[in-house]
Each structure stands twice: as structure tokens, then as C-alpha cells.
């Protein structure tokens, strides 16, 4: 990441030196903010929240079942034969492993879904930035989070324009 930021700064300095006589138009965009504040980004977050809540409900139900099994095992322990105790303990352990697999599978699915949704929107936002850069005659547009920018003037931040354009293009598609 630091190498990318350093190389962007070096390119920026080179561009400024090269165009010393001409006015250089530079913009900054915060893609994370654009992702968070765009309509599609908000819908994606809401979709992820719904999926998470559904998965969480299933996991909580499974935990309740396991707790019930453990309570039964504890309360019946003195009444059961060694073989019956062993059988119930094995069943409990199998259910516990199933819960662990369920949690892991749910986490993996959430990560995949997030990468899918975020990746698609991020690609679309980058395309908007490129088109906006050409239309508004920018010489350079830097990504605020990734470029190592330590200071920026609000004048060069085009994030709100990117969000507005992206939302407009998404509405036109739908």
C-alpha cells in the first residue's frame, strides 16, 4: 500500500514539474465514502444485514438446542448407564461440531457475498471516476484512502460528484 501511495506522489510531482507552465487539474475521491453513501451501497449494506440476521437466528436456535442438550445431560447424568451417557455425550459433541461448521460456513458465505456486492459497486464507481475525469478534464484523480494523501482541499474532492453520477446512472439502468 505504501509503495502505491509513494509511487502516486512521485507521479504527481513528475506531472506537476512537467506541466509547470500549464494549470494541472487534480481531484481526490474517497471510494469508501462513495460506496457507503451511494444508493447501491446502502442497499448492499441492508441486504448484508438481512442475510446476517437470518444466519444469526439459525445459529442462536442451534445454540439453544445445544444448551438444552447439555442441561439434559447434566440432569440425567446420575440416572443413565455409562453407555447411555457416552451415547448422549457423543451426540452432543457431534451437534457442537455441526454448530461450529455452521458458524464457519455462515462467515464464509457472508465474506463471499460482501466481496461480490462490494466488488461490483467498486468497479462501477471506478468507471464513473474515469468518465467523470475525462468529462471534467482532470489531469489526475487520486483515491483518498489508498494514495497516502496527507492533506486535501475540499475543492479537489470530487467524491460527492462521483456519488451523484453513480446514483443517477444506476437509476437510469433500473
Image (spheres, grey):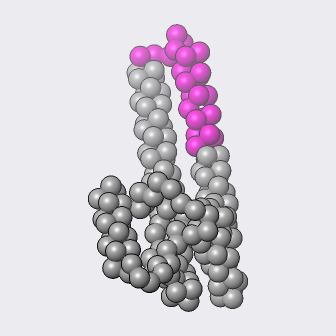
- Rendering quarter of residue 101: top left
In percent of width and height, residue 88 lies at 47, 27
Q: How many marks?
A: 0
- Horizontally, residue 35 falls left or right of residue 14, namely right
- Rendering quarter of residue 173: bottom right
Which residues are the magenta region? 58-82
In percent of width and height, residue 158 lies at 59, 72
Q: Residue at x 50, y 78 (%)?
A: 25
Q: Which residue lies furthest to the top in this view?
A: 78
Q: Which residue is drawn at 46% across and 79% down?
A: 24
Inspect this view and state whether residue 47 appears. Answer: no
User: Is residue 157 covered in magenta?
Assistant: no
In percent of width and height, residue 34 lies at 60, 67
Q: Residue at x 57, y 86 (%)?
A: 136
Q: Quadrant of the N terminus?
A: bottom left
In percent of width and height, residue 151 lies at 50, 56
Q: In this view, does 151 lie above or below 118?
A: above
User: Is residue 73 covered in magenta?
Assistant: yes
Q: Nearer the viewer, residue 162 or 168?
A: 162
Q: Which of 61 and 120 is in front in this view?
A: 120
Amino acid at each position: 500500500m505504501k509503495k502505491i501511495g509513494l509511487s502516486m506522489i512521485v507521479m504527481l510531482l513528475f506531472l506537476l514539474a512537467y506541466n509547470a507552465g500549464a494549470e494541472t487539474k487534480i481531484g481526490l475521491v474517497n471510494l469508501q465514502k462513495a460506496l457507503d453513501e451511494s444508493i447501491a451501497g446502502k442497499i448492499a449494506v441492508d441486504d448484508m444485514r438481512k442475510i446476517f440476521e437470518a444466519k444469526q437466528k439459525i445459529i442462536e436456535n442451534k445454540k439453544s438446542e445445544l444448551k438444552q442438550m447439555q442441561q439434559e445431560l447434566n440432569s440425567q447424568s446420575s440416572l443413565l448407564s455409562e453407555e447411555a451417557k457416552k451415547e448422549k455425550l457423543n451426540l452432543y459433541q457431534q451437534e457442537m461440531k455441526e454448530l461450529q461448521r455452521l458458524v464457519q460456513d455462515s462467515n464464509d458465505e457472508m465474506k463471499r457475498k460482501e466481496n461480490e456486492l462490494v466488488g461490483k459497486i467498486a468497479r462501477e464507481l471506478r468507471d464513473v471516476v474515469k468518465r467523470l475525469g475525462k468529462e471534467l478534464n482532470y489531469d489526475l484523480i487520486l483515491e483518498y484512502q489508498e494514495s497516502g494523501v496527507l492533506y486535501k482541499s475540499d475543492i479537489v474532492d470530487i467524491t460527492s460528484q462521483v456519488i451523484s453520477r453513480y446514483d443517477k446512472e444506476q437509476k437510469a439502468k433500473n
